[in-house]
Amino acid sequence: MKKDKIIISLAGNANVGKSVIFNHLTGLHQHIGNWPGKTVEKAEGTLHFKGHTIDVIDLPGIYSLSTFSIEELISREYIAVENPDLVINVVDASVLERNLFFTLQLVELETPIVVALNQMDMAKKKGINIDHKKLEKILGVPVVPTVATSRAGIFELMQTSVDVVEKGVGKPTKIRYGEEVETRIQKLSKMVSRLHLPYPARWVAIKLLEEDEQIEGRIRQLDPKIVSVARKLAEEIEGIHGHSCSTVITSERYEIAGRIAREVQEIVPPTKLPMSERLHALTTHKILGYPVMVAVILSIFFAIFSFGDYTSQLLGTLFENVYSIY
Ligand SMILES: Nc1nc2c(ncn2[C@@H]2O[C@H](COP(=O)(O)OP(=O)(O)OP(=O)(O)O)[C@@H](O)[C@H]2O)c(=O)[nH]1
Ligand SMILES: [Mg+2]
């Protein structure tokens, strides 16, 4: 179905390249303001792509979708409640495992996602090869490799995003926790699904087990019994594992992220650059470049003072001999 206006938000960890992608997409057509009632910057812009008008929102960089910081709360409320047509999850390919921890939480929000596997150049430099097709299969969402700084893959990213909005894609793979956690999530989801919430029931169940204050507050207003059941289930998990339920869920998530990263990436010795490129890197280095320049100038002076007299004498004798012949 062709949509006249598409809303896409960029989400991901801090420093992954969201703003570079945002600037490529929206150019001068952007507006910087604040999130309502907050001092956190909100960047919005518009682009026209193949007959579509696309509004792009650059979300603040965060590491999780808990409510530990105002940025996290803004991002998850925006994604869950405002329901953009698509979230582009920008991922730093050179630290895949850490970034997948966030991706897994986005998947739980059940919003349509395209992963921009950015900083592929940095990953390559570190000797990390990523099978993005395999990652796509495991996550159940499209993955587009990009190098935002050189604009590589940005067109493909937009093409894939528009395709997902227009044609839809299959559901992302469900993240399954360990048996003790999983059965309790399912029990709680059933209770939550009877309430009319803007969030997916399974996600709310997980948040309740994690004792997320904001979600607990909302559910308590609607049905306080659900919160007490959740607390009881969380205590059971704590009893089994010997750690708080939120710690258990977080560590299981890290374990899943680590497993996926290991499955899709291959560590190879970093590719050795040719001599010319290594020389170029050395001479244009922002610190080492200066001593190299001084060394080159000093050796030119040294060469002139050491061999200058000898060379000029040699040339002088040569010309004198040539002159005497004529
Ligand atoms: N080598 C390389 N550097 C990149 C790439 N994409 C972004 N960068 C660099 O990474 C740094 C962070 O980029 P930003 O776009 O500001 O990151 P961000 O995700 O918006 O960061 P926050 O707003 O802090 O969340 C900048 O120095 C970029 O130049 C890439 O594909 N390759
Ligand atoms: Mg940014």
Image (tube, rainbow, N blue to C red):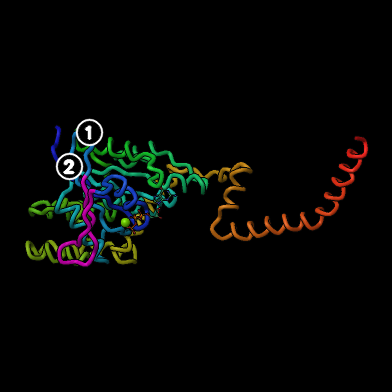
Quadrant where the image shows the N terminus: top left
**In the rendered view, would you say 148 is above or below 206?**
above
Tell me residue 35's x, y (percent): 18, 61
How dense is the environment of label 1, judged by Cα within 10 Å: few (below 14), some, or many (20 and up)? few
Magenta residues span: 29-46
Q: Which residue is mark 2?
A: 6
- What is the secondary structure assignment of the residue under circle 1? loop
Tell me residue 64's x, y (percent): 30, 58
Find residue 258 and name its label. none
Tell me residue 12's x, y (percent): 31, 53
Find residue 50 and name its label. 1
Camera-side mark, 2 or 1 = 1
Judge from the rendering whether residue 264 lies leftward or rightward of residue 272; answer left or right: left
- Tell which of 218 and 226 is nearer to you: 218
Q: Amino acid at mark 1?
A: Lys
Furthest residue toward front: 326
